[in-house]
Amino acid sequence: MVVLLIVVGVVALFAVGMYNALIGKKNTIKNMFGAVDTLLKKRYDLIPNLVGAVQSYMKHEREILTEVTRLRAEALAGNLSDDQKMDLDQKISKAIGDIMVAVENYPNLKANEQFMHLQRTLAEVEEQISAARRAYNAAVTDYNNAVEMFPTKIMAQLMNYRTKRVFTIGSTERQSVDVHGLFQR
Amino acid sequence: MATSQRSDFAHFYITNLLKDLKKLEVTRKKVVWRLKILFVAAAAIFMMSLAIDRGFGLSGSFPIIVGILLVPVVTFLYRFLISGYVHAFKVNVIQKIVHYIDPDLTYTPTGHVPKWQIVGSRIFSKHPDRVRGDDLVEGRIGETNMQFSEVHVEAKHESTTSSGGRQRRWSTIFRGLFFVADFNKKFSGKTLVLPDTAEHVLGSLGSFLQSLNLTRGELIKMEDPELEKHFVVYGDDQIEARYILSTSLMRRISEFRNKTGKRVCLSFINSHVYVAIPYARCLFEPRVFRSILGFKGIEQCLEDFELFTGIVEDLNLNTRVWTKTAEEPLSPLARFFLNHPAGEPY
């Protein structure tokens, strides 16, 4: 009887431990995504400055500028799921990258001090977003490991926890940038 | 060293260094002669104490006491006798080697990275009580201000002896090269990249133990397997640590560690990077009991300096594409106050 109680007690302790660990990991993901969100917002705030700085120079690349403005509006519209936010993030990263490549064709713009400062600020924000994405992915991997590995798998199934998606580079973005094509637009 | 670089330096050695080395070799021989006299005298004193002990039928503790007293005296006199020679070597030879590497670097033979920088790096878990060192090199390489020196960092241990008196003992926390530079990104927290022992030996249990080491901050698992194999990363903030340790920097740190073959420690505090490379041997010291005319010895000095000044390029510190631009160089007066904070002995 006593032995049974001890066994039940130990199992209960384990169960509590696993439950708490899974909750902790889920909350870490939420925390990390929150940080990514904040940095994405910082980037959205810089986009009007970027478009304003380049549009008087880049008269032939209207399409890229319109695209980035549209994506920003979509992001700020709100009510997006985490997955939708991640997809949008990838598209905006690519769009800003395209603009920076196009700028290479305008030495006056490149040499402009205000623009250079903006470029540095954008590069810094991109780097911070990249760090936040990596931290998010680490948290998700940790959580996914707990959800998929034994014995926490049992508890995860009981709690109805599913694996989550990490930030990945989309297949379109993986194609190398066609610089010539960019300038043709 | 690449063949062309080696021949350049060999030419420099012949035209600029050999004359000074020959003069110093003469000095060295005189010093060795004096040291021989010192050792013979010490041996003679010890022999005499043995003889006195036997002659007077003492307990046998007399020669032991004499022996114990002789050790610090001989050590002190040894250091005193070689000091002039060592200083002359540094001022005439090492100074020229540093100038050869980069004329804008300053070399101070008796200077070292100040204690506040070493404490501030948070690399050492034991609080340093005493910092000694020499061969301070400082200046700007490209966009990066940096300084490095040899340091010997010690902790004090005080205890009461059986007779009630206080006894002070010093233990070495670190001995080797300490390097500080301004980093190319702005950040405010602390991130430590320390050599990994536990994970290597104990696997996931080791990982777990590392995560318990709360004094260092949160354990941060990085994605680079090469970095994780040799280092353990602690920090205040998961995101800031990854902001500092980009995929490229992680790779560079691993490569640098392989280059030195030593248990390198790094820390990133308040937009600065600190690197500590342990060395058992003394760097940039001239040989006393062997000739200093050999090219190999001088070449080793150059290679050591190039390894340390090369840290700036190895860690890509000159890439300044973010908002942290190069720090303005300090005026000599500002540098003085920075290196001698009030109340801190230099």
Image (tube, coloured by chain):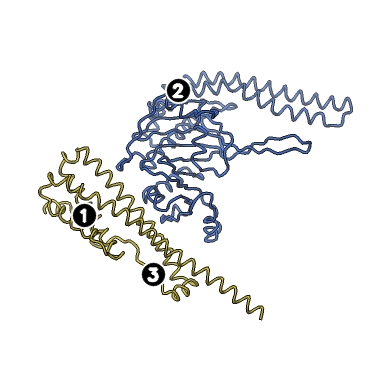
Residues packed near mark 2 inside 10 Å, few (<14), some (14 to 19) or many (20 plus): some
Q: Chain of mark 1?
A: A
- Chain in blue on the image: B
| SS label for mark 3 | loop
User: Based on the displayed image, in which of its 4 quarters is residue A25 positioned?
Assistant: bottom left
Residue A99 or residue B280, whichever sits in front: A99
Above or below: residue B18 compared with residue B243: above
Q: Are marks 3 and 1 in contact (CB under 8 Å)?
A: no
- The percent position of residue B295, horizontal first and vertical second, equals 48, 29
- The percent position of residue B346, horizontal first and vertical second, equals 53, 28
- The percent position of residue B172, horizontal first and vertical second, equals 60, 38
Residue at the far front: name it. A78
| SS label for mark 2 | helix
Q: Nearer the viewer, mark 3 or mark 2?
A: 3
Above or below: residue B260 compared with residue B282: below
What amino acid is labelled 1 in the image? Ala
* Identity of the residue drawn at 35% across and 31% down: B328
Residue on which the image places disc 3: A163
Residue on which the image places disc 2: B17
State the hue of chain A. yellow
What amino acid is labelled 2 in the image? Leu
Residue on which the image places disc 1: A95
Which quadrant of the figure contains the N terminus of chain B?
Answer: top left
